[in-house]
Amino acid sequence: MSRITPGKLRISPEPIELAPLLANLVSGFIPLAKRAGGGIDLSVPADLVGHWDRLAVEQIVDNLLSNAIKYGGGQR
């Protein structure tokens, strides 16, 4: 919320290798997924580089993984 100014979301894209970022994020969810009876598989090209807003990607992936674990019924 601190990056939102009166009605404007500030996005700061920068060159980022997506694979290590996703691997780091996913690793934090593996214990939660196991406790929920499931697991997480990550398949992303190692050389996937783009201009991403790091915080936005982290928030989106966090939300997606949290919801998948919460509502996924223990599936991968």
Image (spheres, grey):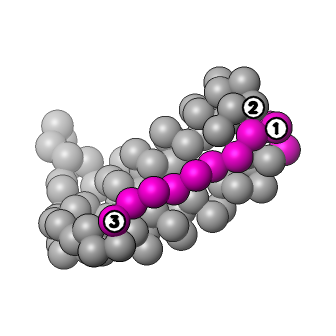
Q: Position of residue 69 (x, y in %)?
A: 66, 36
Q: In the structure shown, which secondary structural element does the residue marked by tag 1 occupy?
A: loop
Nearer-N-terminus badge (1/2): 1
Q: Position of residue 35 (x, y in %)?
A: 84, 44
Packing grade of label 1 (10 A; few <14, some 14-19, many >=20) is some
Dividing the image into 4 quarters, which one contains the C terminus? top right
Q: Quadrant of residue 72?
A: top right
Where 8 sits versus 68, above or below?
below
Relative side of 16 to 8, left or right: right
Measuring 63% from the left and 49% from the top, which residue is drawn there? 40
Instruction: Give the magenta-colored segment's residue range.
Output: 35-45
Taking the image as drawn, is residue 38 in sight? Answer: yes
Distance from Cα at disc 3 to Cα at disc 2: 26 Å
Tag 1–tag 2 contact (CB < 8 Å): yes
Packing grade of label 2 (10 A; few <14, some 14-19, many >=20) is some
Q: Quadrant of residue 7?
A: top left
